[in-house]
Image (spheres, rainbow, N blue to C red):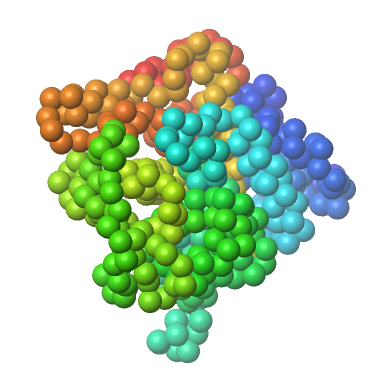
Amino acid sequence: MSADRRNVAPFFLTGTVLDEWFSPMATILEKSRFSDAIFKTIPMATLIMSGCLRQILDASSLREYIQTLFHFDANQSITPIARATWSDALASPVRRDILRPAVVQLVELARNSLPDLLAHVEGIGSREVIATDATYQTESAHYHPRYPNIDGGHDNQKGHMLLSHFDVRHGIALTVTTETRSLGEMRVLKYEEAKGLHWLRVKEAIHVVDRAYIDGRFWDQRLKLYGSTVITRMKSTLKYSVMNENPIVLNTSHQGVLYDRTVKLQSSQGAWRLIGFHSPEGIDYEYLTNDLKLLPGVVAFLYHRRWDKEKYYDSFKNDLAGAKAWGKSPVAIEQQALLGIVTTILTRLFLMRRQQDLALDKLDYTQDKKHQKKLSVYNHTDSGVLLRAMWQNLAKIPRQVWRFLKNCFACQHTTDLYKRQLEPMLLRYL
């Protein structure tokens, strides 16, 4: 056995916080059909765990990450792993093909375990609510981009595209597609559909997207084949004609709604709705949907909850090591993005277990003052939207939790530790 394999992260594999944090993924890998015998150096579970740890430590540089691991164990006289060994493992298609189905299983575990954040929303029943958006990642220092308008290359000037689908009900990312070429987001979405991506074929799903994904014919097809609908913001360049003014019943689900119109888009064969909405901040918005049954106030609210996906990207780039690519190969770029999903989901599951250990009514008390202020404004003024004022089901992981994991991952897993070090971070800001 190589020295690399003997010395990979020995200090956080026995009863530590990280060991307990990683346990759901470890269980999934134990039941997966693959053998570590095909790998000469890093076992698959160790690669995934160390990749997640690199995300938590926010180590964009591999040198920084390996040196950090080296200094955590004062008994080591050699670095736990060579940089080339770790880079080769990250760029391995064989490992990527093991990680992909493991992520699918982890997503399903989280969906069955985490609470339904939209359970109280009127009129959506058990329909899936899937937000889709893309973010862009700076290239690795080893990646030499070639741009179309400079020297005839095909790389994207924004960086590598990471297009994700987000489960708004449970507050987790479902999947990610990475793309280095200079392609539009809608084009990549159509590639996903052509490959049979499950989340684009869920029956009666509600897709929430921004204006980059307005394509009447594409969403007509989703509606015809699967009964799924879309909610987006109106684009000023869209050509349409008003067919009907729909009545608005006065109730709490319709607060802020200015109008609800049935319209005909030039780019679509079906009927759509144009909904005007006045936000509590005093800004007027127009939402577009081909769902003829949803309440207009719920349409505005579901688009507002798309903000959870923006917060996921915010954490991926600013709390974790996701802002810059770790490698230059498409496989390495994809594995890094998948490890971001794994890290976030494992943290959500970890916090759910700690909520039970610490007997907390909820996971995050740090936003209580903000919630009380929203309710006070709603109760004492004529402005405000009750659906928003009452909303406390946040999916964002507090930054203080990431700092706890970053500084305590090698500590022994005990309830006393969580009582002393984690609970104060959940109850209030420092």
x and y percent of residue 344 in the render? 53, 40
Left or right: residue 361 compared with residue 382 = right
Nearer the observer, 160 or 47: 160
The extreme left residue here reads 381
Q: In the rendered view, would you say 25 is above or below 187? A: above
Identity of the residue drawn at 19% across and 41% down: 280
Asked if residue 62 lies left or right of residue 290, the reply is right
For the residue pair 215 and 321, the one nearer the viewer reads as 215
The correct choice, above or below, for 251 with respect to 131 in the image is above
Hey, which quadrant is residue 397 in on the image? top left
- Relative to residue 377, is residue 129 drawn left or right? right
Q: Please state the horizontal and vertical placement of residue 128, each as a whole percent of the image.
A: 54, 45
On-image quarter of the N terminus: top right
Nearest to the observer: residue 358 or residue 76: 358
Residue at 23%, 25% (x, y): give it. 375
On the image, the x and y values in percent for residue 32 come to 81, 42
